[in-house]
Image: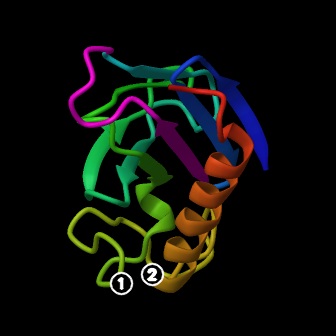
């Protein structure tokens, strides 16, 4: 696991194949947050925010630029890491369940990864922000 970025109001943590993006600005904040994370995915790779099943595309260098929506966290994974017909975002998943870039992770593992990353974020940043 690597902490890629810690800004005044945001944080990015990468544990392949997952990129977790957090903010502490809240849903009605006047501060717009945009995460910019350099070259952690394959060039032009299709990604999925597993919390909302929204598609995101890595650029030609494998970097991502993602705006925060209402201060909500985002957890990006390659679409190929998610098994078609699986428990997590089956409509946008492109994985087959056969080991490709990573195993077709079942929903329970993704959920625990999100919980673990959230707890880590709040423990590390407690009392430092607004």
**Residue at left offset 27%, top offset 46%:** 55
10 inside magenta stretch: no
4 displayed left or right of 23? right
**Residue at left offset 70%, top offset 51%:** 123
- Marks 2 and 1: which is nearer the front? 2
Q: Nearer the viewer, residue 69 or 17?
A: 69
- Expressed as whole percent of the image width and height from the top left, the position of residue 80 reads 46, 61
What residue does disc 2 label? 107
30 inside magenta stretch: yes
**Residue at left offset 56%, top offset 67%:** 115
State the SS at label 1.
loop
What residue does disc 1 label? 86
Q: Residues within 10 Å of mark 2 (few under 14, many from 20)?
A: some
Up/down of 41 relative to 82, above or below: above
Sequence-wise first label, 2 or 1: 1
14 displayed left or right of 50? right
Q: CA distance from mark 2 to mark 1?
A: 8 Å
- Expressed as whole percent of the image width and height from the top left, the position of residue 84 reads 33, 77
Q: Nearer the viewer, residue 128 or 77?
A: 128
Is there CB contact under 8 Å for labels 2 and 1?
Answer: yes
**Extent of the magenta region:** 18-31
């Amino acid at each position: 696991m690597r902490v890629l970025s810690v800004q005044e109001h945001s944080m990015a943590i990468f544990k392949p194949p997952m990129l977790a993006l957090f903010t502490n600005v809240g849903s009605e904040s006047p501060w717009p947050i945009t995460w910019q994370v350099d070259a952690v995915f394959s060039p032009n790779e299709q990604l999925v925010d597993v919390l909302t099943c929204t598609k995101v595309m890595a650029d030609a260098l494998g970097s991502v630029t993602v705006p925060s929506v209402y201060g909500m966290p985002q957890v990006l994974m390659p679409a190929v890491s998610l098994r078609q017909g699986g428990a997590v975002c089956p409509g946008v998943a492109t994985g087959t369940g056969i080991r490709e870039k990573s195993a077709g992770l079942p929903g329970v593992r993704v959920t625990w990864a999100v919980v673990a990353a959230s707890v880590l974020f709040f423990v590390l940043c407690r009392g430092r922000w607004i």
